Image (spheres, helix red, strand yellow):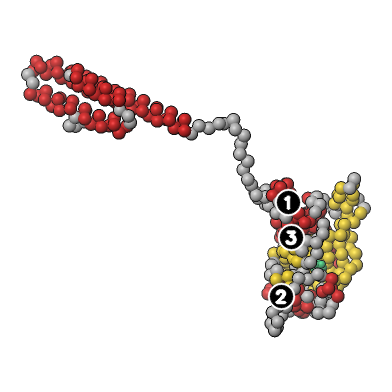
Amino acid sequence: MDDLRDKYITAIADAADEAALEDIRVQAVGKKGEISLKMRELGKMSAEERQTAGPALNALKDEINSAIAAKRAALADAALDERLRGEWLDVTLPARHRRRGTVHPVSQVTEEVTAIFADMGFAVAEGPRIDTDWYNFDALNIPTHHPARAEMDTFYMHRAEGDDRPPHVLRTHTSPVQIRTMEARGAPLRIICPGGVYRADYDQTHTPMFHQVEGLAIDRDISMANLKWVLEEFFAAFFEVDGIKTRFRASHFPFTEPSAEVDIQCSWVNGQLRIGEGDDWMEVLGSGMVHPKVLAAGGIDPDEWQGFAFGIGIDRLAMLKYGIPDLRAFFDSDLRWLRHYGFSALDVPTLHGGLSR
Ligand code: PHE
């Protein structure tokens, strides 16, 4: 009995892992284990022998079982220690900066403008950035030799010699979307058309690609008064100042008659621009009553319908509202600039939730 105990207690102490320990358990106290077999022999013993051997075997079995349990716990502890040593972590290290993208001011302002006009019943319409010169010019009452074509610094698409398809241009404004939407949907209409436009120009306030939002409302009995109300509502909501004053200056666009350039009230305090106060003026957009020829080009009867239209620079609105000095930086993809001027992707501009935070 003492030999058995020594043998198994030593083996248990020396077991290197769980598997070795399990082998020992099976050998000693498993169904066909050495101690189990011995216990089966009890029946062949005399009653006297059985009285000493029985309890002794039972005690040995218990001792081995608890030695195995203790060793199993020790092995588990050792394994945990080993893991903790391997996964050592310095909680005093500075946190690693998580890289997060931001919403570009052009996207932000587009969302803001869309939210404001949606509230006044304007739907968003879109058109292609590469368009025919008919949509970009002719249909808007700018015939081939009109000086406005030369003023626009248009990018013309290359045409192979002998290719007589109509010439394509990078659209110089969002106004062609007026024509496309009139053709597709007819009157009445209330739309805004945000998107990229192109002109060959480059300095602090001009880039070859920039963004506009076109507005177009067509109905019966539409007048300049409706235009003025809609724009004043828009400026008050966009710049978040009530009762912002506007000034309509007579102007000229081939596609509107009459036409007006619109200024908003502003002031300069220590070189800082303040929108919606003071008695200076800042030009922000072109507008007017849609020219009868433009309605006709879009397939709408000008004797039955009238409309107003306007075009605003989105990038320019962003510069004014968020105090961004140089337009060229909008298109540099400089992450430092984006982190500074960008917006959180989770703050979607809405009229009820606030346009900008
Ligand atoms: N398309 C004009 C521009 O780009 C702006 C405009 C739009 C003016 C609609 C009047 C009406 O300069």
Label located before the other in sequence (3 or 2):
3
Question: Between marks 3 and 2, how big is the CA–CA gap?
Answer: 37 Å
> What amino acid is labelled 3 in the image?
Phe
Image quarter of residue 92:
top right
**Of the pair 4 and 160, the residue shown nearer to us:** 160
Residue at image x 33%, y 28%? 72
Element on which disc 1 rests: loop
Question: Between marks 2 and 1, how big is the CA–CA gap?
Answer: 42 Å
Q: Which residue is mark 2?
A: 158
Q: Relative to residue 224, is residue 84 depicted above or below?
A: above
**Of the pair 300 and 101, the residue shown nearer to us:** 101
Residue 130 percent across, percent down from the top left: 70, 71
Q: Which residue is mark 3?
A: 117
Asked if residue 60 shows in the view, the reply is no
Element on which disc 3 rests: helix
Label located before the other in sequence (2 or 1):
2
Left or right of 332? Residue 250 is: right
Q: Which residue is mark 1?
A: 355
> What amino acid is labelled 2 in the image?
His
Left or right of 38? Residue 196 is: right
Residue 235 percent across, percent down from the top left: 81, 56
